[in-house]
Structure formats: C-alpha cells, structure tokens
Image (tube, helix red, strand yellow):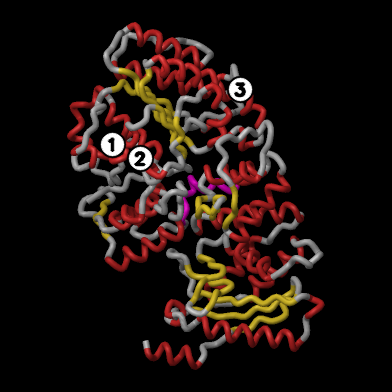
C-alpha cells in the first residue's frame, strides 16, 4: 500500500515513508551525457522532486543511504560512475518577488545566503557565510574559501525555480525585470560567477529548472554554458507522467495512513478515472520529435489524495494552487501590443490551436510578437505542441486549460464592453438546467451577453460565437463538462453538455444550434432549420454513447442575429426507442 505524496517533493522522505514514487531514475544516465543543463516545465510537473532525486543520488555524503533510497529503482541496478561523487549546492528561488517591504534583490540575496549556509552546514566546512548586500559576492566568497580546502570532489549546483522573480515582468514591471538581468544586474552577476567557476572546473555539473524561457534569454550573454534540454525528445517524460505510468498507478492499493484504511480502484473505476485524467490533466507534448503525451503529475496526486482521504472525487478537478493562469494570460497579453495579442487568444479559444515558432530568445525590450506570446503560453503549460509541418502547430492540451482560456476571455469581453454578467442569474440558470433539463434561462443569458458584448455589426457574426458564449457561461460551474463539435457516430454535435465526475445534476444536454441573419429570417427559414436540426439529432443518437444515456435532453435552438426565435426539445424518436429495446 502507498500513501499519496501530494505536496511532497523531498525524494528521501518519499522513499523512507513509502510514499508513491514513479521511477524517473532512468534519466540519470541521460543527464550525465552533459555537464550543464537547463530544463523548463510548467508549474507542478515534478521539477523539485527530480532535483531532490539528483541530490540524493550524487551527494558524496549519501553513499551509505544508496540502497535504502534507490532499491527497486532503475538506477540501483544500473548505477553510473558518478554516483555519490559531488558536493551538492542547492538554491531554490521560489517566492522571490517584489513586496512592500523587500525588493527583488533582497529576496534573491536571502535565498543565496540560505543555500550557501545549508551547503556549509551539510558538509561541516570551516567556512563563514559572507555578510554582503550582493548575491554574487556571497557566492564568490564561498568558492574562494572552498578552493582553499583542496578537496578531491567537485561541486554540483542544483537551481530550482531559477526564474521565479519573472512574476515581476508578468505583473507589468518589465523595467524592473530588465534592470536585474542587464550587465551589472544582480542576477546576471550571480550567474557570471557560476559560469567563471564552471569554466575553471570547480563546478563540474549544473542542473537548472524553471518555467519561463524569458529569464534565460535575457541573461544568455552572461551565462552561455548551459544546454537547454526543454524540447529534447529524450527528456520529454523526465517530469510528469506517461499514459502507462498513470495506468499502473491506478492498479495500486492506497492508504491514508490510518489503521486498516485502504482503498483501490476496481477495473471499471480505473477506466473511468483514467478518462477523467485524460480529459483534464493530459495532452502535454514537449518535443515535436515524439508523440509521448504527458500528464500533469501534481494534479494526478491532487485527485488521488482527495479520493483516498475523503473517499470521493474532489469537488473541483483543478487544484486551487494552480488556478492562477487566467491572471498570467492577461499579464502576458499586456506586456506589449495588448490589442493584437488579444486576437491571438481569441484565435486559440475559437480553434483550440495556433501556428507559430518557439523562440530561442525573447527580448521584450526590442519586440514582442505572436511567436513570443506562443512561447510564453507554451512555457506555462497553456499551449502544447500538436505537430510540425514546416511550422509548429500548437494546441490547448486539455479541458482544464480550455476552461482557463474561456474564463479569461469571458472576463476580457465583459471588461471591453463595460457589461457585467449577473452571476446569481447565471448560477440559477445552470441549476435549472441540471435539475430539470431546462435550457430557456441559460439561453436568455446567452442572448443578453451577445447583445451587450458583441459589436453591433453582425457581418462577421456566426454560429461559433453563440456556441462560444454558452461555453463561457458554463465554465463557471464545476457541475458540467462542455464539448463543442463532439464527434458522434454520424456527425459533429454543436454542444454536448455532460455531467462532470463529481456532479449532482440529473440532466445532460445535447444542443444543435442554428443561426440565421436578421435580414434572412422568415417563418419558412426557421422551420427549415428546425427540420434540419431534427434530422441531425436523430443521426447523432444512433451513437451508443448517446442512446444509452437515460437523462440526456436534446434541443434545437434557433438564433436570429443575437435573439432567440425558437427553442425546440427533440423527444425520443421511434428509431432510438427500438435501439434502446435491442440493447
């Protein structure tokens, strides 16, 4: 039985306390092929745990714990020549940011001093931490005193969240960001010291993790010794979980730690849970040279931790610690050319994909274009690679991220139009839909939203805007999962509104939308569209996934311009009745 290591990134604790660990030690031999590496991944993909694993493996003082910590893992039976060969110097820059009381440099300096002090205490060196106002001078003093010790083993530096202070740039303080990274800035100077000592051989290895490439790009001229392996195929699943890994996890037995408290998934529950994970936590492809899609590991642990401890599915499928991406989108969009950048976001929301090129350098002081926006959205996990055909195609990885975009776009549209949706009416409309299968109240809100937020000129207005509005209004509820253009056996359903795994709703809905221009609206045209909708719906429900859904209501909704002119519920057809009787 395993306990779930949600929020635990200490490798030694996980192994000693018998917490669940997905073996990533195979990648150690890949890490050793280079000396100085940078690996970027979105938040909560297991970066800190990976560094902790490297720390335990390479630490010269941990040789006596090797069997205890690595028994049963790949590297135990395939150790490398550098096992337990280094003095490990770790820095963690998470939490470094501007505050009312402390500057970026104060926070950065404190983390550097903390890392240096831990290093000295860890190995019992007779070295004092320099009292200084400069991170670079603290580090330089450490290396100077370390060299005097004339030790056989070299230093291995691990840096976690190297870019955390980029929160300043994503909060609109771009000038502050540029100041700390330019020549003579405290961050650039810090890394120049590391570069100098690496070139002299005192520092033999270096592994840096973070999220955003923008920090790396801005300091490149002062620190050009590291290889960025972010999009290399061989490291694509070093962090996060593969499909096979997730399926194996679901076969295990878990415990909350209490006496006789254990839980496991039945075969059917494994299938159902995996499907929830696939829709919401999967879809990340970090290299265009392979097709291994990756699950967000922390969200998997979040779900399992709640399920094991509460014996039920979490009310929200997204961890609140990760649900800040809407603000991050706005900060990226607002860096430069906000109006143009908003169009890229609208393109992503409408099509769920966008074409562009990942930028090796982002210099916001000179330019900020479409490819820069794509690169930053890729960095934070809001876009992922879909494929490559002369140019890279990016897509939205999963439903969770799609909902983040929809929520952001809804807020953006309301801000631009000076219109505020009545949230109480919205909530009540969703409740009516779930409890009684009623769509009228929600559709009235869709019409109101369109009238107040869409430009009065309807030349470019079409059905997709109506569909998008339904999705934006429903995204605020955790009771439903909304699929647009859902592929049924005989066609694509405009909107399929299904209950989420934790939903208490009774009804699900299938909606076929019809849009007629105001100038073309006649009774005959409305009847024609209704007849076409009936034919489409009766074809859709031949799909077993729909015909076997007992509480599925089916509607045709006809819009003339922004106004609703007809709502018709399509009752069970004779063909569907016969199909159900046969099954």
Q: CA distance from mark 1 to mark 2?
A: 8 Å
Instruction: Residue 79: give x, y in percent of width and height.
Output: 22, 34
Q: Indicate the quadrant containing the C terminus: top left, top right, bottom left or bottom right.
A: bottom left
Q: Which label lies toward us, 1 or 3?
A: 3
Tell me the residue at 56%/21% (across/down).
105
Mark found first going from the N terminus, 1 or 3: 1
Mark found first going from the N terminus, 1 or 2: 2
In the picture provided, is 54 more to the left or to the right than 18?
right
The answer to whether residue 527 is magenta is no
Tell me the residue at 73%/85% (across/down).
525
Find numbered disc 2 in the image and state the secondary structure of the residue it sits on: loop
Find numbered disc 1 in the image and state the secondary structure of the residue it sits on: helix
Name the image quarter holding residue 275.
bottom left
According to the picture, the residue beneath numbered tag 3 turns out to be 182
Residue contact at pointers 2 and 3, CB within 8 angstroms: no
Query: Label 2: how many residues lie within 10 Å, few (<14), some (14-19) or many (20+)?
Result: some
Mark found first going from the N terminus, 2 or 3: 2
Residue contact at pointers 1 and 2, CB within 8 angstroms: yes
Q: Is residue 160 in view?
A: no
Instruction: Residue 347: give x, y in percent of width and height.
Output: 64, 56
Q: Nearer the viewer, residue 219 or 457?
A: 219
Tell me the residue at 67%/77% (across/down).
514
Q: CA distance from mark 1 to mark 3?
A: 39 Å
According to the picture, the residue beneath numbered tag 1 turns out to be 13
According to the picture, the residue beneath numbered tag 2 turns out to be 8
Q: Is residue 360 in view?
A: yes
Name the image quarter holding residue 536.
bottom right
Task: Please give the range of residues in magenta.
Answer: 317-326
Q: Residue furthest front?
A: 390
In the rendered image, the vertical position of residue 320 relative to residue 573, given as above or below: above
């Amino acid at each position: 039985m395993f306990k779930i290591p949600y929020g635990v990134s200490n490798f030694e604790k996980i192994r000693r306390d018998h917490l669940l660990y997905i073996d990533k030690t195979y990648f150690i031999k890949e890490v050793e092929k280079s000396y100085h590496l940078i690996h970027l991944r979105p938040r909560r993909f297991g970066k800190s745990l990976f560094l902790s694993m490297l720390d335990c493996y390479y630490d010269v003082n941990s040789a006596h714990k090797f069997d205890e910590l690595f028994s049963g893992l790949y590297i135990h039976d395939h150790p490398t020549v550098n096992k337990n060969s280094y003095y490990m110097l770790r820095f963690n820059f998470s939490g470094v940011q501007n505050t009312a009381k402390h500057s970026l440099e104060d926070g950065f300096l404190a983390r550097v001093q903390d890392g240096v002090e831990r290093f000295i205490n860890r190995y019992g060196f007779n070295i004092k931490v320099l009292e200084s106002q400069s991170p670079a001078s603290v580090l330089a003093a450490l290396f100077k005193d370390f060299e005097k010790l004339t030790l056989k083993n070299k230093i291995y530096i691990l840096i976690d969240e190297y870019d955390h202070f980029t929160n300043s740039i994503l909060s609109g303080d771009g000038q502050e960001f540029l100041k700390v990274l330019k020549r003579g800035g405290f961050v650039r100077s810090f890394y120049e010291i590391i570069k100098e000592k690496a070139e002299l051989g005192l520092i033999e290895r270096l592994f840096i993790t973070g999220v955003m490439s923008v920090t790396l790009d801005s300091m490149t001229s002062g620190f050009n010794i590291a290889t960025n392996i972010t999009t290399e195929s061989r490291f694509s699943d070093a962090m996060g979980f593969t499909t096979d890994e997730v399926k194996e996890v679901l076969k295990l037995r878990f415990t909350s730690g209490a006496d006789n408290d254990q839980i496991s998934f039945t075969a059917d529950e494994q299938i159902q849970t995996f499907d929830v994970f696939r829709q919401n936590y999967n879809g990340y492809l970090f290299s265009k040279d392979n097709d291994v899609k990756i699950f967000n590991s922390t969200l998997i642990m979040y779900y399992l931790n709640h399920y094991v401890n509460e014996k039920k599915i979490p009310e929200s499928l997204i961890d609140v610690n990760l649900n800040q991406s809407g603000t991050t989108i706005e900060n990226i969009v607002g860096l430069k050319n906000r109006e143009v950048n908003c169009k890229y976001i609208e393109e992503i929301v409408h099509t769920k994909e966008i074409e562009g090129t990942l930028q090796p350098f982002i210099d916001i002081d000179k330019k900020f274009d479409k490819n820069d926006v794509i690169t930053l959205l890729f960095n934070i996990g809001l876009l992922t690679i879909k494929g490559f055909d002369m140019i890279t195609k990016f897509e939205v990885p999963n439903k969770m991220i799609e909902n983040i975009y929809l929520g952001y776009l809804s807020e953006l549209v309301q801000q631009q139009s000076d219109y505020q949706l009545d949230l109480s009416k919205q909530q009540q409309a969703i409740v009516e839909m779930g409890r009684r299968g009623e769509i009228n109240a929600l559709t009235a809100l869709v019409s109101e939203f369109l009238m107040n937020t869409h430009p009065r000129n309807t030349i470019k207005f079409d059905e997709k805007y109506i569909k998008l509005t339904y999705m934006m209004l429903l995204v605020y509820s955790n009771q439903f999962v909304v699929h647009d253009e859902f592929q049924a056996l005989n066609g694509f359903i405009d909107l399929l509104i299904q209950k989420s795994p934790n939903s208490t709703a009774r009804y699900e809905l299938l909606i076929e939308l019809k849009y007629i221009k105001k100038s073309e609206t006649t009774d005959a045209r409305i009847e024609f569209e209704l007849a076409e909708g009936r034919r489409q719906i009766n074809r859709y429900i031949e799909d077993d996934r729909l015909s076997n859904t007992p509480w599925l209501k089916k509607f045709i909704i006809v819009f003339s311009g922004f106004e609703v002119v007809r709502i018709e519920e399509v009752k069970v057809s004779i063909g569907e009745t016969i199909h159900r009787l046969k099954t």
